[in-house]
Image (tube, helix red, strand yellow):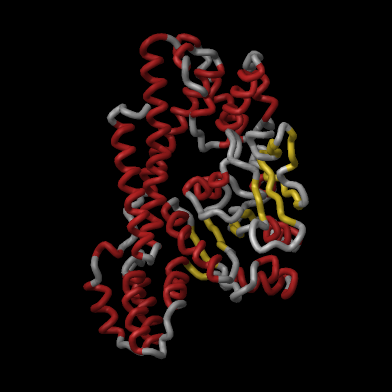
Amino acid sequence: MLESGAVSEADGRLIDSQGDRLIFPIINAMNEVIAFGGRKIEKVNFGKYKNTRDTIVFNKSKALYNINLLKKLKKTQTISNVIMVEGYMDTISLYKAGFTNVVASMGTSLTQDQARLLKRYSDNVLISYDGDAAGQKANDRGLDIFKSNGLNVKVVPLTDGLDPDDVINKLGADEYQRRLDAAMPLIDYKLKSAARPFDLSKTDDKRKYVAEAVKIIRTADSASEQEDLLKQLRDITGITYESLRRDVDSAPKESAAPPVKVVERKDASSVWERASRFVIAAYLFNSKVTAGIDVSDIDFADDVHTIIAKYIRTQTLLGERVSPAELLELFDEGTEEYAEINRIFDYSDGERLKGEVAEKYFNDCLKTLKLYHIDGEIAQLQAEITSETDVEKRKQLTTKLQKAISQKKKIKDGDNI
């Protein structure tokens, strides 16, 4: 409880860290409560929301609020799209109004792990953040990240100052559905977002906007899409199509989208899954290759592997035997999670987990897991750099990217296993 931040300690006394707050249990796809969010009941100027801390089972950047009910929904129907909102109340209001295909990022910037989690349920995401500047900025940071993971992203337009909860309660479910129907494709939203700081009635502002818009249009997936967007820009600015076309053709190449190759990530995923299974099996079946390495120090992105790692860690701390059979009771028979457990059990042949060959493969698997996550971090930084317009912030992100690339090299060279 102390580690998670559910309680804190002062002068030898345990204190309720979430006192005077409305509590929202955060539940994972396995229907387990993994953390708590608390909303201050009294009016405050800051700190309205407070989550318990990251633990072995909860990482805010990898979790989505209401993912458990989205998984339940998928068992009954095909999910054509998922609505992504920011907070708990937005989720609850939409769900109550009949929009049960909703999850929340809980205020975090959108991440690679959240994108991969969403893709299990649908390829289409409608991002419905607050209509204020802060909410729109959060959109800008995460859109490319989601697209780089093969998701078809659209942005739901909301009036400035309104969030989804406001639209439902003040304007009604039908009006919110109209907003969903008007969701804008990613590149169209970027063009609209780029115009926000400028007064297009002023010549200087119009020229600055055109420069930004040209960079965005150049990243379009096809020539026909470019042509359509250029015509829209022509109508907005009054500049001839031919002039805008020349600007796009002569724009610097670095303005294009980052080289995030989704196909390569998918191919790497199967390697990552096999590595995860072997590592988990080594702990489950008490292989000597795990000596000196705590399972809680290993970063698993898949829910099933995270749950098993938590079970192993808990049993170890209690000094009790790790029972592979008990794991099957954690999941419903016939589910993908149950099938994954059985794939892990395929490694139960003791000879596969013994000797120098097994030790070398175990270390190679650890390296694979580290590379998988550092690749995700690199791809996310590349996407953030592309969508960030502030020069100083781009420099900071570039520095982080260089460090991540350096870290990847160390891992590949075997200096950071």
Tell me residue 319's x, y (percent): 64, 14
Residue at image coords 67%, 57%: 48
Q: In this orientation, which residue lies closer to the viewer: 346 or 140?
A: 140
* For residue 88, side relative to residue 308 (left or right): right
Residue 243 seen in the current view: yes
Residue drawn at (47%, 48%) of the image: 112
* In-image side of 252 versus 278 (left or right): left
- Residue displayed at 67% across by 49% down: 66
Q: Is residue 336 above or below residue 354?
A: below
The quarter of the picture where residue 91 lies is: bottom right
Left or right position of 257 against 331 = left
Above-or-below relation of 373 to 348: below
Residue 62 location in percent, x, y? 54, 44
- Residue 98 falls in which quadrant of the image? bottom right
Query: In this figure, what is the number of numbered marks?
Result: 0
- Quadrant in which the N terminus is drawn: top right
Asked whether 76 or 207 is in front, the reply is 207
> Is 152 or 132 nearer to us in this picture?
132
* Residue farthest to the left, as pictured: 250
Q: Position of residue 171 (x, y in %)?
A: 72, 75
Rendering quarter of residue 268:
top left
In which quadrant of the rendered image does the C terminus lie? Answer: top left
Position in image of residue 132 (x %, y %): 57, 71
Q: Residue at x 27, y 78 (%)?
A: 245
Query: Going by the image, does 367 lie left or right of 167?
Result: left
Q: Report if residue 32 is visible in the image.
A: no
Query: Where 110 sits versus 200, above or below?
Result: above
